[in-house]
Image (cartoon, rainbow, N blue to C red):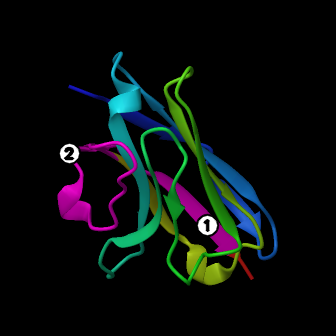
Amino acid sequence: QVQLVESGGGLVQAGGSLRLSCAASGRTFSSYAMGWFRQAPGKEREFVAAISRSGGTTYYPDSVKGRFTISRDNAKNTVYLQMNSLKPEDTAVYYCAGALSYSGYYYTHPKNYDYWGQGTQVTVSS
C-alpha cells in the first residue's frame, strides 16, 4: 500500500510559477512510475506528466511541454512538478499517481495507475 500526499498548490498570476510536491509513504517508491494529472470543473481528468522509476524517462503532452517539468527524488520518496509560464487554462486540481512498473516504463492513462493522492488546487488568475 502506498499513500500519496500532494502539496504546493495555490493562487498565482498568469506567467508565474509553482512547484508541486507529492510525498509517498512506504519503502518501495522506486518501484513505481509516477504521474501527474489534473482535473478542471466539468472536465475529464487530463494527463500532465509522467516519469519512470529511476527518473531517466519523462513524458509530457503538448499542452504543457516546455513549461512543466517532472522530477523525482527516490531517496526522499517524493515526485515534483515544476510549473512555469502558467496560464489560466492550467487552473485545476492536480493529482499525483503511482503505478508499479518495469524499469523505464511510464504511463499516460489514469487506468494504469494504482494509487492516487487527494489532489491540490492550482488557480491561475489572468
> Which residue is identified by label 2?
114
Which numbered disc, 1 or 2, marks the residue closer to the eye?
A: 2
Across and down, in percent, residue 67 comes to 70, 71
Q: Residue at 37% of width from left, 45% of height from top? A: 33
Q: Using a 10 Å C-alpha cutoff, classify the residue at mark 2 as few (fewer than 14 neighbours), some (14 to 19) or many (20 or more).
A: few
Tell me if residue 100 is in the magenta stretch.
yes
Extreme residue toward the front, this view: 103
User: Which of pointers 1 and 2 lies earlier in the amino acid sequence?
Assistant: 2
Q: Residue at 37% of width from left, 21% of height from top? A: 25
Q: Mark 1 falls on what kind of element?
A: strand
Look at the picture and state if 121 lies above or below 6: below
Q: In this view, does 50 lie to the left or right of 72?
A: left
The residue closer to the viewer here, 24 or 119, is 24
Q: In which quarter of the image is residue 14?
A: bottom right
Q: Residue at 33% of width from left, 32% of height from top? A: 31
Residue type at numbered disc 1: Thr
Q: Mark 2 falls on what kind of element?
A: loop
Q: Is residue 19 left or right of residue 60?
A: right
> Which residue is identified by label 1?
123
State the extent of the magenta-drawn residues as a range. 98-124
Instruction: Determine the CA span between mark 1 and mark 2.
Output: 27 Å
Across and down, in percent, residue 107 comes to 32, 60
